[in-house]
Amino acid sequence: MTAKLMRREDRIEVIGEMTFATAAWLLQEGKRALEEGGRLIDLRGVQALDSSGLAVLFGWQRHAAATGKTIGVINPPANLMSLAEVYGVDPLLALAQAEEAARSETRREE
């Protein structure tokens, strides 16, 4: 299995694996997508995730902050939240508020 990113307006959809095998590619391609206007990271399509995936998310957050932007993560898989809690970094994850995600979803359907 591999990973791919799809950008739709301000949303970056992650599909496939966020694991050690895909982390370097995801980090670079995600940075590019953020520079092109992405700000919501949709993890609905993530099928496998390990601590490398968590590191990628934090890398994207750092990159966004360095360029004066903020991002939000929507549809995080349960295992992401479990990993973040085990490592004690769950408060640091940029989870998007439900209202923001709903607005983005509405724009996407129009």
Image: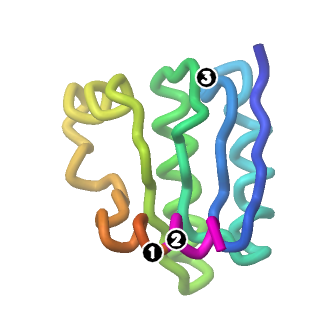
Is 27 colored magenta in this rendering? Answer: no
Residue with the mark numbered 3: 19
Q: Is residue 43 above or below residue 2?
A: below
Q: Are marks 2 and 1 in contact (CB under 8 Å)?
A: yes
Q: What residue did someone put label 1 on? A: 103
* Magenta region: 104-110
Q: How many marks?
A: 3
Q: Nearer the viewer, mark 1 or mark 3?
A: 1
Q: Does 108 lie within the magenta span? A: yes
User: Measured from the top left, where is residue 103 in percent x and y?
Assistant: 45, 75
Q: Secondary structure at mark 2?
A: helix
Labels 1 and 3: the sequence-earlier one: 3
Label 3 residue SS: loop
Disc 2 designates what residue? Answer: 106
Question: Residue 18 location, x and y as percent?
Answer: 61, 29
The picture quadrant where one finds residue 31 is bottom right
Discs 2, 3 touching: Cβ within 8 Å: no
The spot of residue 41 in percent (x, y) is 55, 55
